[in-house]
């Protein structure tokens, strides 16, 4: 009977959205993110980046003359993607869309530098100050001011879809 057929194309978007608490916890994990900017010719420039936090926002450090920074100086639109999962049932991620703020203030840069260092290299101590300063030499910080968040966690589907 037609009524016994499984439904196809059933919208399950509302089931997989993460709460703000789940998003925050996910982003605190030690992952790489894909950062996308817009090239002068309109194509998308995407690159994997380590990230940290500055003033409660995602931020990265980069060479001041890097393509991504040059793109953001011309067009501040920025999208980042942090994702995880090896199978459909375990896919989860967060996309953040917003405007980039390029920062060259040493104190603000150092806050982000400590965050990145602590997340990916080693727990930060005052003995690491020189390493962080070297990491930030001839660099800028890009802070993402988020305007829109998209999230998904397929684990919420209970292993089926």
Image: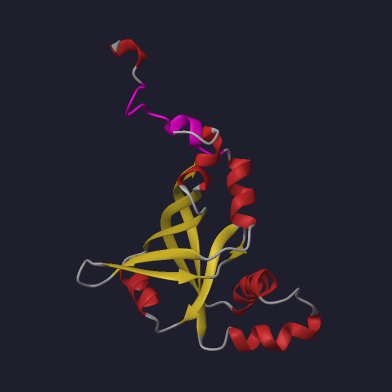
Q: Which corner quadrant of the image does residue 48 belong to?
A: bottom left
Foreground pick, 2 / 126:
2
Q: Is residue 14 above or below residue 98?
A: above
Residue 128 horizontal side relative to residue 33, left or right: right
- Give the residue displayed 62% in from the left and 89% down from the top: 134
Q: Which corner quadrant of the image does residue 73 belong to?
A: bottom left
- Give the residue displayed 33% in from the left and 11% down from the top: 3
Quadrant showing the N terminus: top left
- Give the residue displayed 57% in from the left and 77% down from the top: 105
Q: Position of residue 22 (x, y in %)?
A: 61, 43
- Give the residue displayed 55% in from the left and 61% down from the top: 58
Tell which residue pokes out farthest to the right in this image.
126
Tell which residue pokes out farthest to the front in this image.
1
Q: Which is the main secondary structure of the residues drawn in magenta?
A: loop
Look at the image and say whether residue 13 sits in the magenta stretch.
Answer: yes
Q: Position of residue 68 (x, y in %)?
A: 38, 74
Q: Position of residue 17 (x, y in %)?
A: 50, 37
Magenta highlight range: 6-18
Foreground pick, 106 / 66:
66
Quadrant showing the C terminus: top left
Q: Position of residue 99 (x, y in %)?
A: 41, 59
Residue 11 visible in the current orientation:
yes
């Amino acid at each position: 009977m037609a009524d016994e057929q499984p439904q196809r194309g059933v919208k399950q978007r509302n089931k997989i959205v993460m709460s703000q608490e789940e998003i925050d916890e996910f982003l605190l994990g030690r992952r790489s993110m894909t950062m996308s900017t817009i090239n002068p010719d309109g194509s998308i420039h995407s690159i994997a980046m380590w990230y940290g936090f500055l003033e409660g926002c995602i931020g990265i450090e980069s060479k001041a003359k890097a393509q991504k920074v040059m793109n953001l100086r011309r067009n501040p639109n920025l999208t980042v993607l942090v994702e995880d999962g090896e199978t459909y049932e375990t896919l989860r991620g967060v996309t953040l869309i917003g405007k980039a703020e390029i920062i060259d203030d040493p104190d603000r840069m150092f806050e982000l530098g400590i965050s990145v260092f602590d997340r990916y290299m080693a727990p930060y101590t005052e003995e690491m100050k020189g390493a962080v300063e070297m990491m930030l030499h001839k660099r800028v910080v890009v802070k993402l001011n988020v305007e829109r968040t998209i999230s998904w966690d397929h684990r919420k589907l209970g292993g089926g879809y």
